[in-house]
Amino acid sequence: MKVLVAVPALNEGAVLAQVLESLSTVQPLADVVVIDDGSRDATARIAAQAGARVISHAINLGVGAAMGTAFKYAARAGYDAVVQFDGDGQHRPEHIGDLVAALGDADVVIGSRYAQSGTYKSSAARRGVQRLIARVASAYARTRLTDATSGFRIAGPRAVAVFAEYYPAEWLGDTVESIVLATRQGLRVRELPVGMNERAGGVPSQSVFRATLYTGRILFILGLATIRSVPPQVRDARRRNVAKESA
Amino acid sequence: MTPQLLAIVMAVVLLLAVIVLLRSYVLPEKYAVIWILAAIAAIVLSAWPGLLAAVSAFFGISSPINLLFVGGFFVVILLLMQVTLELARTRDELRRAIQKIALEQEEQSRSDD
């Protein structure tokens, strides 16, 4: 299975070289693509110097759009699976093999911090919020998801085909809306316990206002997903495939 | 048919239009919240005229319809402001994207020689 590791990065120049170096122990950097999402620092240059492939967005479009670009690139370049791996050093390369192995009985596998009694520390309020989101997301995916907003995940061949056509680009849509989208397309979603590091760079948004906005946004996306139909791009792609098969 | 019924029907049609547009991925989520709120406000105000009268009395406005006009005008101005800012941002992003494409094409044509 040809696996692409996609690193969406926005101004990660400070830690990116280190992250790519740790990635290179498990994955040839020629099969790592850094999606520079309109960074104002040296992110793109550092990634290219390290030997990774680099795709630069001219302007900042958000994580969802960056992954959308990665899926389109993967489909073009003939990759079977895409791993999303953060550029801030939070994710651990040694789990990539586990994610690939877990594709055997799933199309999307999400690395979860909370599935196991991990060492990952977070505040009580944050945990409560995560639990609420997890409960709603689990109901959609019809499987237990404890860390639905995790950015450490893998998409298998069938999921790459769908996500290359359409990947939610609006704020936080890439986390939970992608799960609903995959489930709707008949793809199997499951989670896998992983360990994570404390963020090397950047501060997590902890203010009460941000947290409320974040939770409200995610629940709004999930609520919206109940009334939404299939994205037109995915529907068109499916129609093309049916036409191809019958021809 | 009473005018109130007409108002309720119009407000419900607005809400349904918003939902249909959202459902088919035409209306982006970013603007969905404000439109859903506007539609719900329209339904509440038309179904419950007493509310408008009560709020008007609180502000000392003798004719409730004036509150509706002032309030509605204010909301429309805010929406217009948001659209203007959004348009400015989009133009800026478009300019940067086109400049980047142009620079890269130039670079490519040089390396082709």
Image (cartoon, coloured by chain):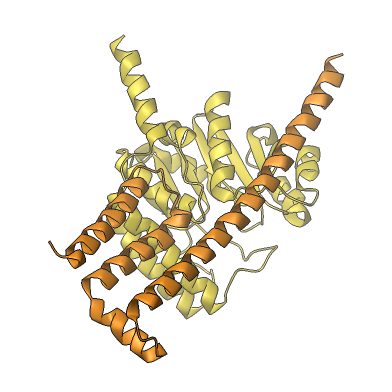
Chain colours: A yellow, B orange
Left or right: residue B99 compared with residue A67: right
Position of the C terminus of chain A by quadrant: top left
The image shows residue B89, relative to residue A28, as above or below, that is below
Q: Which residue lies furthest to the left in this view?
A: B1
Q: Give residue A85's position: percent from left, percent from top.
A: 59, 48
Q: Is residue B95 something that shows in the picture? A: yes
Left or right: residue B97 compared with residue A67: right
Q: Give residue A123's position: percent from left, percent from top.
A: 51, 78
Q: Quadrant of residue A233?
A: top left
Residue A162 vs residue B34, the one in the foreground: B34
The image shows residue A132, relative to residue A7, as above or below, that is below
Q: In which quarter of the image is residue B32?
A: bottom left
Residue displayed at 38% across by 34% down: A232
Residue displayed at 48% across by 56% down: B30
The image shows residue A210, relative to residue A13, as above or below, that is below
Q: Is residue A146 something that shows in the picture? A: no
Residue A48 vs residue B107, the one in the foreground: B107
Q: Give residue A131's position: percent from left, percent from top.
A: 38, 69
Residue displayed at 48% across by 62% down: A113
Residue displayed at 20% across by 60% down: B6
Q: Which residue lies furthest to the front in this view?
A: B63
